[in-house]
Amino acid sequence: MQIQAHATDAENLLKQGLVTTNDLMKVQVQLSDALVRQIDADNNVKLSMYVLNNTIGLPLQTEIALASTIRPADRTWDSVDQLVLQALEKRPEVLGMNARVRASEASLTSVHGGWWPQIFLVGNYSYLNPNSRYFPMTDAFKDTWDVSVSMSFDIWNWLQTGHQSTQAQAQLAQAREGLSMMKDGITLEVTESYLAIQKSKEREAVSQRGVAQAEENYRIMNGKYVQGLVANSELLDAEVALLQARLNLAQSSVDYELAIAQLSKAIGE
């Protein structure tokens, strides 16, 4: 840890009379702050593991070894239009709503059938002993058959068919509107996730350059500090800048991984 090394160097320089006690105290205060941050980070890791264990049904104390590191992978993505199309084809809620629309359309078609006469075709075949259709009846098996056509039409059913048709049309309109709103929401969700990935990739690239610059600045300042060419405050500033640069890089990498997960969910993977 750079701050620990800085504290050790400050103690040595204090013994040589090259820095003041106040300079050493500033380094030790920064070291204490870094240790507190480390404790908080360790506690957050444990808490996150407990939450994960509870979510997947494992004992809370179970130790989980991560199979991958938080590092943006080199992956190419289709255009937003292609991702939206994939989401609309795979998302289970869209498939369910499409089925609901089709069911409403079939229900409306069925209700409309009440406006038309109903025609029935009936056929019968009998093989009986004795067969009453034969005269005179004899003690023997004989077969007979008949076919009939009938038609019925409701002249007045107290507007039941009209009311049912209105209800079916309203249900169909509701299902179609729900499907349209769902598609709009999914389109927005996919677009936001796609833009979040692009932003995270750009931030990760900038953060990598920032870490490289901060490390070089710290290396130079640390060398000058050991030689007594720069003040203690300048090295402290370099350490803070390096810490912040590394935090920015870690956060951008986490944001990238989360954006990938969100986009995968949004497109139904």
Image: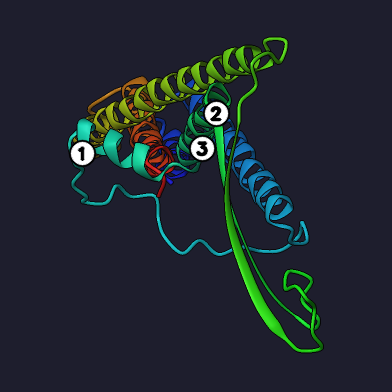
* Residue closest to the eye, 144 or 172: 144
Residue at the disc numbered 1:
212
Circle 2: element type: loop
Please state the horizontal and vertical placement of residue 206, each as a whole percent of the image.
21, 30
Question: Nearer the viewer's eye, disc 1 or disc 2?
Answer: 2
Q: Which residue is mark 3?
A: 93
Q: Residue at x 35, y 34 (%)?
A: 252
Separation (CA) of disc 1 from disc 3 = 46 Å
Q: Residues within 10 Å of mark 3 (few under 14, many from 20)?
A: some
Give the residue at mark 2: 117
Residue shown at 24% from the left, 35% from the top: 201
Q: CA distance from mark 1 to mark 2?
A: 83 Å
- Residue 220 appearing in the image: no
Q: Amino acid at mark 3?
A: Glu
Q: 249 or 9: nearer the eye?
A: 249
How busy is the neighbourhood of tag 1: few (under 14 within 10 Å), some, or many (20 plus)? Answer: some
State the SS at label 3.
Answer: helix
